[in-house]
Image (cartoon, rainbow, N blue to C red):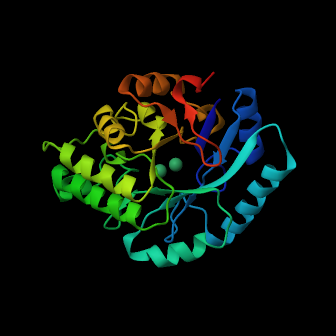
Amino acid sequence: MIFDYHIHTRYSDGTATHQEIIDRAIELGVEEIGFSDHYGYYPNNWTTTEEVLSKMVEEVLYYKKSQDRINVLLGLEVDFYPDRIEETKAVLSKYPFDYVMGSIHFINGDNFDSDPKHPIYSKYGINRLYELYYENFVAGVESGMFNTMSHPDLIKKYNYYPTKDFKSLYRQVAKVLVEKSVMVEYNTSGYSRPCKDFFPSDEMTTIFIEEGVQFTIGSDTHKREHLLRNYRLAKDRLISLGLKELQRYQSSPTPLIDFMI
Ligand SMILES: [Zn+2]
Ligand SMILES: [Zn+2]
């Protein structure tokens, strides 16, 4: 069983069409994919707009119904803005999403994950920056908008690490995830980013597993070649850390030993 729930197309900042992704996924033996283009209440250069969103949904629904070679799900990756929860919910409620992923790409209005030299990395100090990131993350979990939180430690993307030990903070985050029944994504793109590490790290993954947080998986595909990137390595890593199964959105979980075979 193979699935990939984090895929962008030309509707946001990806380079491929839905059809091109579907064809490549079938070639790779993928049985289920979820399209998850970017949306945010405040549009930016990687999001789809509200007008285009309805067209995108229509297109994914077309592929969902019109072919049976692969299971297609309608997902979305949403920029989380703590000051726009109700407005975002109103937009999401218009469409029949199979799942919605929440992403922290902004802290107090600053986008930290597009520029390694962004002033935010010196603005608060790295320890405080991590605290702010996880304040936003927890607010996202508590918002009730999301099935899953994407790339749970994206803040490390450019290799900025705290000097403080944040294990107890991560444990608190895990408890809120479990309490609110929100899953996290094991995002395999991190291994190809400057940090050269999965999102989340082994440390955070271990704490999440201990606390009973549920995991999905996604490659954060922006072009066809990204589908399933670093997946075999991810499977081995997750098994070594003690995870037993990966969650699916519309079926029972897949035991990790049956994943990628
Ligand atoms: Zn993202
Ligand atoms: Zn993404």
Left or right of residue 42: residue 178: left
- Outermost residue toward the right? 66
Q: Is residue 193 visible?
A: yes
Count of marks placed on residues: 0
Taking 3 as reference, is 180 above or below it? below
Quarter holding the N terminus is top right
Quarter assignment of residue 71: top right
Q: Is residue 119 visible?
A: no
Q: Position of residue 205 (x, y in %)?
A: 35, 37
Quarter assignment of residue 3: top right
Q: 13 or 213, which lies in front?
A: 213
Q: 19 or 152, which lies in front?
A: 152
Taking 156 as reference, is 225 above or below it? above
Q: Position of residue 115 (x, y in %)?
A: 36, 49
Taking 140 as reference, is 73 above or below it? above
Residue occupying the point 34% across, 54% down? 112
Quarter holding the C terminus is top right
Q: 205 or 82, which lies in front?
A: 205
Q: Position of residue 4 (x, y in %)?
A: 60, 39
Residue occupying the point 37% across, 30% down? 196
Left or right of residue 216: residue 223: right
Q: Position of residue 84 (x, y in %)?
A: 44, 75
Residue occupying the point 44% across, 55% down? 181
Residue occupying the point 33% across, 60% down? 138
Taking 218 as reference, is 143 above or below it? below
